[in-house]
Image: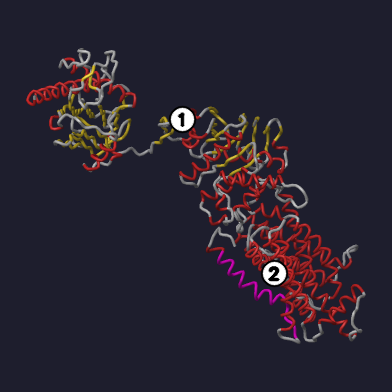
Amino acid sequence: MIEIENLSGGYSRVPVVENVSLHVEAGEFFGLLGPNGSGKTTLFKLMSGGLPVMDGKVLLNGDSVLDMNQMQRARHIAVLSQETNVSFDFTVEEIVQLGRYAFQKGIFKALSPYDKKLMEEVMEITSVTKYRHTSFHMLSGGEKQRVLLAKALVQEPEVLLLDEPTNHLDIKHTFDILDVLKKWQEERSLTIFAILHDLNIAALYCDRVGLLHEGTLTNIGSVDVLRNKNKLAEIYGVETWSQPHPTLARPQLLMNPRKKEERPVSLFDNCTVEQDEKAVSVSFQQPLRTISNGVAGEGIQWIKHFANFHVDKNYDSWTPKNDVENWLDEKGFPVEQSVGMMTAVKTEHAVIKREVLNGIAFLVVVTAGTGNAVDITHRETEIHREKIGTINTLVFADAHLTDGALVNACMSAAEAKVKALHDGEVKDPLSGSLATGTSTDSLVIGVTQQGERTSYAGSGTFIGRGIGYMVYEATMEALAVYRSWKEAHS
Amino acid sequence: MFSSKTWIYYSVSLLLLFGAVTFGLFYSSVTVPVSHILHIILEETAGWGFLDEPPGNTTAIIWEIRLPRVLLALFVGASLALAGAAFQGLLRNPLADPFTIGVSSGAALGAVFVIFFQITIVGLGAFTLPAVSIVSGFITLMIVFGLVRLSSRSMAIETIILAGIITSAFIGSIVSLIISLGDQNEMTQIIYWLYGSVGMRGWSYVQLIVPFAVVGSLLLLTRYRELNALALGEEAAGHIGVNVQRGKVFILGGASLLTGAAVAVSGTIGFVGLVIPHLVRLVTGPDHRHVLPISMIIGGAFLISADIFARTIIAPKELPIGVITALIGAPLFAVLLIRNRVGKGKAI
C-alpha cells in the first residue's frame, strides 16, 4: 500500500528526517510516535507534498506520490491536521463540499448527484448534518474537527494522513473523532497514517506504531512496542510504566513525575482502627497499594479505607456491591478510596493483631466463621454459596511490593489460612474432609510501599514469613472466638 | 443550478446597477429628459433614433461626456471591487483591498511617472499608461509581500496592512518628489488626478480600461473554487487538490491587472475594494462563486453613485471621487479593524 523507501528531507539543506523506510498495509491504522522535534511533522510533510524530498521514494500502490500533482494526490490521499482556521463565514456544508474539489468536472464544476449523496453520508457519520447551515466559526473545537474530518472523508481517500487530529480536544471529542475513523478504516479498508501525541490514545487505536527518534525510525511493530520501558526512556527521557488496559488487550502507559510522593513513616502511626457491632474498619491517612477481592474496591488499587461489615446470616441481596458502597458512604469512606467486604460473623469478634517482625510492621484483622467451610480439593457436584460463613483476612505491612509480589503475598496469606483451618480441624460438612476455607472468603493485602522494592513475598522472604505467621495466629484466635460464641449460643 | 435566493441577489444587484446607470446619465446640472437619453444611446449605437433630433449639444453632453463617464465609473468600480474581493480571499484577510495593501499607490506611482515624463513605450502607444501602472502595482505587491515575509512568519492580517502602509508612505513621498519637480500647474493637475476622478476622461479612457478589465475579470471569476479552498489556508487547500502556486499567480496577476488599469484611468480611488466585497459577503455569504460577480456589479453601481455625488454635491464644482469613497470607506475600515481585534478568529 504505502511504501516509504529511504526517505530523507527537511528544511533548507539539513535533513531532519533521514533514511526512513516503512511499509504500511492497506486498511491499517499506523501511528507515528515520537517526542517533539523528532521529525514527525517533517516526515508527514514529505509524504503529503508540503516539503520537497531530498532523497528516497514514497509509493502508493506502486505509484510515486511525489510525482503526482495536487489534484491526483488529493484523489488518493486526504489530510486532517490539528488545527485549521477558516477565514470568512463559511457554513459547515460549504466546508465539507470543498473536499470534492479534486473530483468536480465540467465547465461549471457543479456537484454531481454522487457528490451530494456522499456528502450526506459523510456528514451523517461524522454527526455534523445538524450543523450543515451553521457557520463553521460558531462550532466548538470538537465539532470543527468533525467537520474537517468530514471534508477529508468526502475525498474518498485510500489513505488518510492525520497530524495530531485530536490535539486540542477533550476526551469525548477525541474518542468521537477516532471512533469515526476506526469505523471508516474497517468498513472501507481506509489506510490511516497518523501522527499521535498521546501514547495511550495510540495504544488504543493503532494497529502498528513506529517510534521516530532524531529523524530515524526505530522500533516499528504492534502497540506492544510501547511496553518497551527502556526504549521510551531513551527516546522521551521519561520513566514510563506499562499497564494492561482493564478490558482490551492493549497496553496503557503511566508516567512518574520526578518528584517522589511523600509517604507515611510508620504503618502503626498512620492508621485508625474502629470496631463496633456494624463493622471493623482500618483507615490510613495515606493510601496503601492494595490487592483485594473485596465486594467493593477489588483488584489492585491505592486504598485508604478498609471496612468489613457485619450482615445478618440470612442476608440475601441481588446488589451486594451497592449495599457495601452505601455502607461505606454511611461511614464517611469515599467509595473510590475504599475496600468493603461483608461477614455474618460479629465484627466485635474480629481479631486485630499488630506486631513488628524482623523490622517489618504488620497489622492483621481477621473475622472467621466456618458455617460454610469447604474442602476445595474435594470433587464437588454442587456449589453451595448461599450462606455467609466467611473468613475475611486483612493484612497490612510496611513493605514495598511489585504487583507480582502482591500475588505472592496473597499466596502466603492463603497458605497460612489453610494451615490454621487444618490445625483447628475445621471440616467440610459435605465431604467430611478437612476444609481449606469457606465458599466466600475475602482477602486484602495492603502495603505502604516504603523501603526497598521487592518482587517476592513468599515463604523465602521475611515479608512472606511475617504474613504467614500473622495470618495463622490471627485466624487460629478468630476460630477460637467463633467456636466459643457458637457454643454459648447453641 | 442556482437557488432562488441567489437569483434574487443577482436580480437586485443588476437592478441597482441599472438604476445607477440611468440616474448617472440623467441627473446633472443640465437636465435631459430620459426619452432624449434613450434616443441618443440607441441612435449612436444602433441607429434607431425614435425622436426628432434633440439639440446637438445635448447629444454631445450625453454621448461624449456622461456616457463615457458612467461607463468608466462602472468599469473602475467593478475592477476595484473584484480585485478587493480576490485579495481578501487570497490573503484570508477581510481588510485587504488594493488601496490598503499598497497596490494602488504602486500603480499610481507608475501612472504619475508616465504622465509626468510623457513616456510612451514603443508598441504600446496609449496603453503605456495602464501597462506601466499594472507592472508597478504588481512590483509594489511583491515588495509588500516581501516585507511581510521578512517581518513575520505568518501572513497576519495586521502585518499585511502595516506593510501596505509603510510601502504606500514611501511611494507617496516619491510621488511628492516628482510633483515638486514640476511647475504649479502640473502639480495641481497631478494632485487632483491622484485623488481620483472619472470625469472629463472621454471614450479613450474607457477603451484603455476595457481590455484589462475583461482579461482580469476572467482570470479572477474562474478562480472562485480556489479562492473558496484558500479559506482553509494554503496548506490545507493543497491537500484537497488545489495547485496553490498556480492559483496564486492567477489571482495576484488578475487582481493586479484590474487594479493597475483602474488606477491608470482614474487615479487612486480608495476603499471600494474593501467596502463592496464586505457588504456583498454579508448578504450572500462567503462563497466566491457569487461574491466575485456580485461585487463587480455592486462595485460598478457604487462608483457610479459616488460619482453622481462627487459632481453634484458642490456643483458647479466637482469633488474628487476618491474623497467620497474614502469618507465612506475609512470609517468602515476602522469598524472592521476593531471587530477583527475583538472577535479574533471570527469571520468578518
| Region in magenta | B317-339
Looking at the image, which residue is at 83% across and 75% down? B68
Going by the numbered disc 2, the residue's amino acid type is Val
Position of the C terminus of chain A by quadrant: top left
In this view of the protein, can residue A22 be seen by the observer? no
Rendered location of residue A7, percent (x, y): 65, 33
The chain holding disc 1 is A
Q: Which residue is mark 1?
A: A250
Per the image, is B335 magenta? Answer: yes
Q: Residue furthest left?
A: A488
Which SS does the magenta portion mostly show?
helix
Q: Which residue is mark 2?
A: B272
Relative side of A347 to A257, left or right: left
Looking at the image, which residue is at 55% across and 52% down? A130
Q: Nearer the viewer, residue B11 or A403?
A: B11
Per the image, is A359 magenta? Answer: no
Q: Is residue B258 above or below residue A249?
A: below
Relative side of A136 to B72, left or right: left
Q: Nearer the viewer, residue B11 or A49?
A: B11
Going by the numbered disc 1, the residue's amino acid type is Arg
Instruction: Determine the secondary structure under disc 1.
Output: loop
The chain holding disc 2 is B
Confirm or deny contact between disc 2 and disc 1 (CB under 8 A).
no
Counting every numbered tag in the picture gives 2
